[in-house]
Amino acid sequence: MPMQRLSWSPLKQLIDLKPGTSNSSRSINYQCQLLGINRSGLYYKLRVNHAKQTIKSHIAKVFEQIPIYGERKVCEQLLEDGYKVSLNTVARYRQELGLQAVLAVKQVNTTMPIKEHKKYSYKLRGFNISHANHDITYIKIAGGMVYMAAIIDWHSKVVLSYKISNTMDAQLLMSVPNDALERYPHPEIFNTDQGNQYTSEAHTQRLKNLGITISMDGKDRATDNICIEHLWRSAKVERIYLNAYQNIGELITDVDDYIEF
């Protein structure tokens, strides 16, 4: 049976570097042959990459503080903190550290169109202007299902207005855009999906009265409203799905904190 090989450091410790001054009379070459190691590396001293260790330590610190961050956001955080590092380096160091973003993924379809309601065409393709996106998503808590409506500015990705309610009624539908329209300059185009809450007369007429062009995603075209879809995904996988909310108050407090974050 072949002898189990030891690691490099213990093997080096077995070498008598001064055979003439000890009980051993065997030469260094002969000792290296017996142990199966190369003499050329006998005097090698491991050089520690202190810059690498510093960056890896900071990556671990970021993970401890914000475990939801993937490699891109970690890289951006390191650059912001004054470290000169590439995305590939961050990805490699995270892999060496065994770090992976703590996320949860679920898919919920929230678009329920009504055939009788008028649909509007998608008017954002090719545009590079400031306009708003409005959408509603479902969130499950201990007592059942609640609804979150939000408006996001396509250009800056800022959440202009949002609200959580246990009913998806006209009050939820209108309060969020009304709040945004009162606090910010009116957009040229207001985009939504084809859900019945957005094709309703109350919603479309409010926008028409303000001279705002109505735009709607194409059928089965979630990418047409990609900004707000990214918001829903980020909020859910980075915060909401990682917690169990006992009531709507806990959810509202946590979402307020996440939006601020």
Image: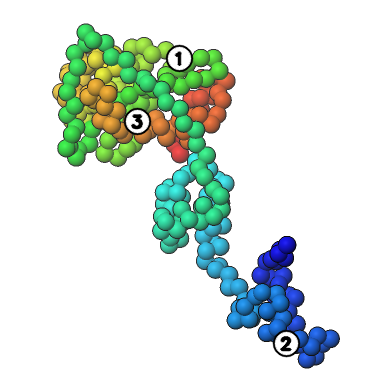
Residue 45: x percent and y percent? 62, 76
**Sequence-earlier tag: 1 or 3:** 1
Spatial CA span between label 2 and label 3: 72 Å
Camera-nearest label, 1 or 3? 3
- Judged from the image, the secondary structure of the residue bearing numbered disc 2 is loop
**Residue at 75% across, 76% down:** 14
Which residue type does callout 2 highlight? Ser
Residue for badge 2: 27
Residue for badge 1: 166
Residue 80: x percent and y percent? 43, 55
- Judged from the image, the secondary structure of the residue bearing numbered disc 3 is helix
* Figure check: 237 above or below 117: below
Which residue type does callout 1 highlight? Asn
Please identify the quadrant where the C terminus is shown: top left
Spatial CA span between label 1 and label 3: 21 Å
**Residue at 53% across, 31% down:** 242
* Figure check: 96 above or below 69: below
Which quadrant would residue 130 be assigned to in this image?
top left
Camera-nearest label, 1 or 2? 2
Return the mark for residue 229: 3
Spatial CA span between label 1 and label 2: 84 Å
- Left/right of residue 199 with respect to residue 68 in the rendered view: left
- Observer-nearest of 18 and 252: 18
Residue 142: x percent and y percent? 55, 18
- Left/right of residue 31 with respect to residue 259 in the rendered view: right
- Left/right of residue 229 with respect to residue 51 in the rendered view: left
Please identify the quadrant where the N terminus is shown: bottom right
* Figure check: 167 above or below 50: above
